Amino acid sequence: MKTKKLKISRIFIYVILIGGVLIAVFPFLWMILTSLKTNAETMTIPPTILPKKIRFDGYVTVLTKLPFLKIYANTIISSVVTVIAQLTFCAMAGYAYARIDFPFKNFLFTATLAVLMVPGTFFILPQYRIINKLGLLNTIYALFLPNLFSAMGTFLLRQFFMSLPQELEDAAYIDGCNRGKAFIKIMLPLVKPGLVSLGILTFRFAWNDLMWPMIVNTSTDKMTLSASLSFMQGQYVTDFPSIMAGALMAAVPMIVLFAIFQKQFIEGVAHTGIKG
Amino acid sequence: MIAPVTLGLIIFYFYPFFRVIIDSFHNIGAFDKDMGFVGLQNYQTMVKDKEMWRALGNTFKYVAIIVPLSLLFALLIAVLLNAKVKALSFFRVIYFLPAITMSVAVSMVWRWIYNGDFGILNGLMTALGLEPRLWLSDKATALICISTVSIWTNVGYYMIILLAGIQGISKGYYEAAEIDGATGLQKFVKITLPLLTPTIFYVVIMLIISTFQIFSEIYMMIDVKAPAIKFTQSVVMHFYRSAFSYSKKGYASAIAVLLFVIIMLLTVFQMKMQKKWVNYD
């Protein structure tokens, strides 16, 4: 009796989970299917599910009408630079706040924490003005400059450094390491989960962000993927295959990256909940 | 070692923080031209700005819909995945997929699904013998449709965090409960839920902060000139349009200040409330 009841509840669990999977996957499928149709076919009533004949018109439009490779490059460069800079700067600062005493430490740390509390949108207007004053609008630098420095990253990595036992570092000093060497050789490898977490969060943010890249860079060959998609949607209003082809091409690199590093992605996100 | 971050934060965050507050008392026009101190004028405009009030109302609606439903579904899936299901990593990967996909691309495909003329959702409605609708122009559905997209992206992300929280609960509690003959539901209510409250608290805070700043979904799914913008635009959308479509940056700064104050108050309120329901032991 009990096993039968257990079995039914098992089936129920799988039904819900698989239903959820369909909801999660359907928009991706629809994106792919639409991108392979002709424009005329997307406007039939009732809609066809599978394309009658597979066509790549949408992809051709996107690749010929927009400097798509340039846009890819812009997005990749700005995301990668942001991640590397944040990891370097935040690891240094996070370590210092966790392990070194220096004047005004508490004050500076509190000020850093305060930035963490403020919504990102709040800073945008003056940031825009600074970039403008520096003459950097419509350059690749504008895309990443303010994002190189992160209060959140500093705090997150400080938490990771704090959780390491002091003895480890002391042992390194006894073995003749200086502070810099102990930091790079001993401490950094130990906070790898933290670096992975921060790296993924930052990359996801840099890759997805819309408002900032949209306001600083308005010429098509300086845009990021998200900004150029929004531009494209305005231009090709009812050319659904092209719009879907563009959306798919913008989404694919992150999905491939996720397929390769899924363990790191999932653990990285899980860690933010535990340490934050 | 703190020099790079501190310097960067001063230039791009501390200075802008004070600048926004000062700017909110100035009249700033096109090309960032400062036309002088105007006292509380921007704030007075804000109080009289019907669009602002509507945007604020819409934003609270987004929070009221997106935060609880994202949490609920994320928790449901996390709990189900924790029940020793087969193919756990397959499910985790699939559910996480929406969360890593560019939100702009996600909004574009949903906009196409919701399309009033040729969208698949209306195709489905017709097939089921129901009336097709103009999902994104209809006052009754537009905000809910946008919220659905946001929930769709949130669930997988927060599910991962909640699942990690659930897996962090010591097995000993469950074993003891099983000896006492507790049912699955009892175990969930008496053990999982109370011990998960710190993680739930974190998830709620993050959801509120991000939903309060909802922008790209609306920007991508509703045309700025469409009448639907009235009952869908959020505070951040109104901020964006004031600053960059109408070049009223002083006024936009005042909106930013309001946004900050509201998020601050909500967070402080949450922090105070947590003593009542969050378990730290």
Image (spheres, rainbow, N blue to C red):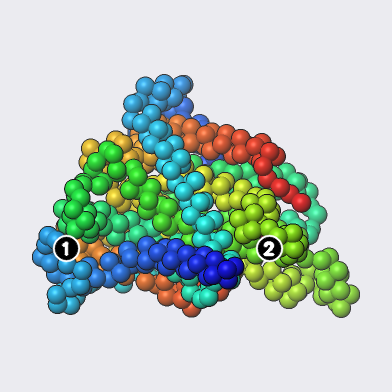
Please rate how many residues cluster around mark 1, counting C-alpha atoms within 10 Å: few if below 14, some from 14 to 19, many from 20: some
Spot occupied by residue B225 in the image (x, y as percentages of width and height): 22, 41
Spot occupied by residue A238 in the image (x, y as percentages of width and height): 16, 57
Which chain does the residue under circle 1 lie in?
A
* Residue carrying label 1: A47
Marks 1/2 in contact by CB < 8 Å: the verdict is no
Residue at 38% x, 29% y is B53
User: Residue pushed farthest right?
Assistant: A174
Give the CA separation, mark 1 to mark 2.
47 Å
Does the rendering let one see residue A233? no
Residue at 83% x, 71% y is A168
Q: Is residue B116 left or right of residue B29?
A: left
* Residue carrying label 2: B168
Q: Is residue A244 left or right of residue B34?
A: left
Q: Is residue B62 above or below residue A72?
A: above
Q: Nearer the viewer, residue B75 or A51?
A: B75
Q: Is residue A80 above or below residue B146?
A: below
Spot occupied by residue B174 in the image (x, y as percentages of width and height): 71, 62
Residue at 75% x, 63% y is B179
Which chain does the residue under circle 2 lie in?
B
Tags 1 and 2 both on a single chain: no
Q: Is residue B53 above or below residue B101?
A: above
